[in-house]
Amino acid sequence: MSLWVRADDGCRLWAASLGTGDPLVLCHGGPGLWDYFDDVAELLRATIRVVRWDQRGCGRSQLRGPYSVARSIADLDAVRDQLAGSRTALLGHSWGAHLALRYAMEHPDRVSHLIYVSGTGIDPGRDWHPHYERNLRLRLGDHLDRWEELRARARTPSEDREQAVLQWSADFADHHTALDHAQRMATPWLGVNEDCNRAVNADVKKEIAGDLAGRCRQLDLPVLIIDGAEDIRPRWAVDSLYEALPDAERVIFPGAGHVPWVERRDDFHRAVTTFLVRRR
């Protein structure tokens, strides 16, 4: 069932809640995308109340800025307050993992557990982007020429979707099923908010240049880091985060890429539920 959250500046944010049990708020990646956690909500609904939402300007939420990390944290706080209660577990994926981490830094008393999935770390001295770009091109294989052609020119909405599907297919380890998985993630196609993407990514870059590691050392809550071993974003980018957190554990799934709950469904379910139950 769709719900609506009103941010502190009046922006309307689409949200949904499914399942029973203690709340877990999910933060999707991007920036500029929409919630794609249907599978995760279904996977966890028997024991966990899963709260999903589209970040501002994205998907079904109101097309309205401003776009920044601070604004995203405030919006997440509104979702938490209106749909999850005074304290909740958080799960963030990709850029959403950074958002969940930053929220926990700002509001540690409002977070019970943090699950950091396929994030890209906090280390300003180790740039993972060149490795990602090289790995992306290798993983695209026969689709590389078409992806580069689309990327280099103005596109129609249908071509935007085609380019995104090709790029997202590289986020899966098994090339036999990668395009099918990417097609599912792009259905329905709600469009990418490029303004949001540029603004938030620039903000994240500024933040990482600061002392996030020092703030992580002060974070007094249990953290689970989940990685797919075949993510094209190098997993060593997360090492310094793992080392800085005082109460963290890490699992790496072989045979999985950037979206581990799709390719290692049972292992993902087991890791998340065990962590949330064991660390109550």
Image: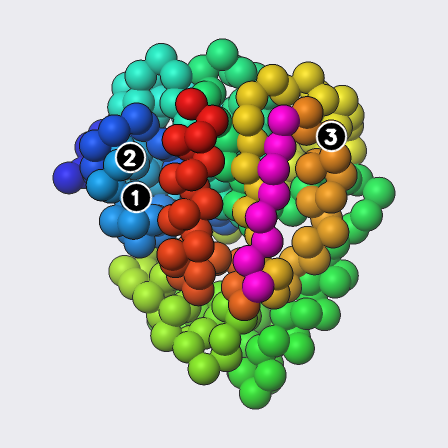
Q: Earlier in the sequence, mark 1 or mark 3?
A: 1
Q: Residue furthest front?
A: 278
Residue 32 position, x and y percent, is: 46, 47
- Left or right: 177 as drawn, with respect to 19: right
Disc 1 marks which amino acid?
A: Leu
Q: Measured from the top left, where is residue 221 in percent x and y?
A: 56, 21
**Mark 1 to mark 3 CA distance (whole Å):** 29 Å
Question: Which residue is denoted by mark 1 in the rendering?
Answer: 44
Q: Tell me how far mark 3 sits from mark 2, CA to CA.
A: 29 Å
Q: What residue sits right under mark 3 in the picture? A: 244
| Residue type marked 2 | Ile
Q: Mark 2: give few (<14), some (14-19) or many (20+) Cα within 10 Å.
A: some
Residue 252 in the magenta stretch? The answer is: yes
Quadrant placement of the N terminus: top left
- Residue found at the very far right of the displayed protein: 125
Q: Verify CB contact (< 8 Å) between mark 1 and mark 3.
A: no
Taking the spot 61% from the left edge, 43% from the top edge, the residue there is 250
Residue holding disc 2: 48
Q: Quadrant of residue 213?
A: top right
User: What percent of the width, then of the height, locates residue 134?
Assistant: 72, 70
Q: Is residue 1 visible?
A: yes
Q: Amino acid at mark 3?
A: Ala
On the question of residue 65 being in view, the answer is no
- Tell me the SS state at disc 1: helix
In front here: 21 or 10?
21
Q: Position of residue 157 (x, y in %)?
A: 37, 66
Residue sitting at x 44%, y 61%: 264
**Pointers 1 and 2 in contact (C-beta within 8 Å):** yes
Depth check, front residue: 106 or 267: 267
- Circle 2: element type: strand
